[in-house]
């Protein structure tokens, strides 16, 4: 099973891939509508909002949490 390099989501079905392209190593949630991968800042913003809303925590705490999680993933490791 492949894991998304940008968010860590398990990709178990063809529907999990952008444009159903199983050669991609990132999931449909980490892709633009044209199939290209979103930037770190785009994912950081999305994950921050998801954490803040789903866990009912302060935006600043959610932003730090999202950053900590994302920077460990393969797609973003080379940024540091």
Image: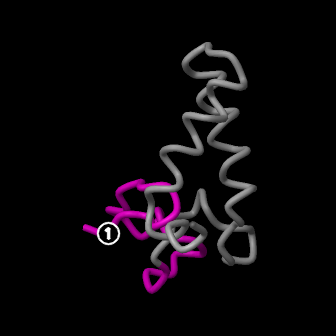
Furthest-front residue in view?
80
Q: Secondary structure at mark 1?
A: strand
> How was the colour assigned to the protein in this rendering?
one colour
Q: Is residue 68 left or right of residue 39?
A: left
Residue 79 position in % (x across, y down): 60, 69
Name the quadrant containing residue 63: top right
Residue in the picture at 35% in, 57% down: 10
Furthest-top residue in view?
56
Queried whether the magenta region covers residue 16, the answer comes back as yes
Task: Give the residue number, with chain letter if any, for mark 1.
Answer: 2
Residue in the picture at 66% in, 53% down: 43
Q: Is residue 38 left or right of residue 65?
A: right
Residue 4 position in % (x across, y down): 44, 64
The correct choice, above or below, for 1 with respect to 68 in the image is: below
The residue range painted magenta reads 1-24
Residue 32 position in % (x across, y down): 73, 68
The correct choice, above or below, for 28 with respect to 24 in the image is: above
Name the quadrant containing residue 19: bottom right
Name the quadrant containing residue 30: bottom right
Queried whether the magenta region covers residue 36, the answer comes back as no
Query: Dot 1, crowdedness within 10 Å: few (<14), some or many (≥20)?
Result: some
Q: Is residue 54 left or right of residue 59?
A: left
Furthest-left residue in view?
1
Residue in the picture at 68% in, 16% down: 58
Decide which of 29, 43 is in the foreground and name it.
43
The number of callouts visible is 1
Residue in the picture at 74% in, 77% down: 34
């Amino acid at each position: 099973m492949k894991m998304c390099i940008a968010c860590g989501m398990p990709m178990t079905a063809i529907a999990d891939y952008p444009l159903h392209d199983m050669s991609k190593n990132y999931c449909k949630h980490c892709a633009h509508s044209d199939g290209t991968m979103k930037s770190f800042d785009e994912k950081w913003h999305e994950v921050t909002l998801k954490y803040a809303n789903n866990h009912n925590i302060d935006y600043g705490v959610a932003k730090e949490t999202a950053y900590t999680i994302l920077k460990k993933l393969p797609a973003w490791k080379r940024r540091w």
